[in-house]
Image (cartoon, rainbow, N blue to C red):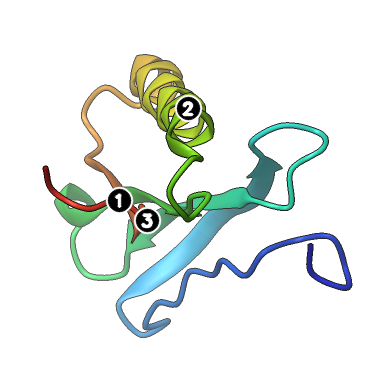
Amino acid sequence: MKPNGISGSAIFWKDKKYLCEYRSMSRFDKESSHVFVYGQFRSVEDRDQDVIFAEAHLKAKKGNEEDRMKQVAKLVEFKRQTQKYFPDTPIIIAGDFNDVPE
């Protein structure tokens, strides 16, 4: 676990192109140092380019597949719930998913 109890995650954006309307962070569970950060970004030029962006750093290493699947399930639920309130806004989820193709 990191000294502050949180693994590194961040979102960066160009403030000349997007304004951050809202941003937050959520732990995958209360014992985990892994979090995902998310935000709602409003395009300065065109409201049709607004976006909700989330970034996650999932648990690494072989043997943690079950934990990663639980983390992915939380991201899917985040997308499902967010889409209810922002049905016309694209939702992008990116990050280090710490998995390899089979």
In the image, residue 53 lies at what x, y percent? 37, 52
Query: Which of the two labelled residues, at mark 3 and mark 2, occupies the earlier sequence position?
Result: 2
The relative height of residue 84 versus residue 8 in the rendered view (above or below) is above
Look at the numbered discs 1 and 3 and tell me whether their residues touch, using CB distance below 8 Å.
yes
> Which type of secondary structure does the marked residue at label 1 adopt?
loop
Q: Which mark is residue 99?
A: 1
Which of the pair 13/33 is nearer the observer? 33
Which of the pair 78/69 is nearer the observer? 69
Quadrant for the C terminus, please.
top left
In the image, residue 25 lies at what x, y percent? 66, 49
Q: Is residue 79 left or right of residue 102?
A: right
Look at 48% across and 69% down and name the residue there: 11
Which of the pair 22/70 is nearer the observer? 70
Q: Residues within 10 Å of mark 1 (few under 14, many from 20)?
A: some
> Which type of secondary structure does the marked residue at label 2 adopt?
helix
Q: Label 2 is placed on what type of residue?
A: Glu
**Residue that carries the numbered disc 2 in the rendered image:** 66
Mark pair 3, 2: CA separation: 12 Å
> Which type of secondary structure does the marked residue at label 3 adopt?
loop
In the image, residue 74 lies at what x, y percent? 50, 26
Q: Which mark is residue 17?
A: none
Q: Label 3 is placed on what type of residue?
A: Asn
**Residue that carries the numbered disc 3 in the rendered image:** 98
Q: Label 1 is placed on what type of residue?
A: Asp
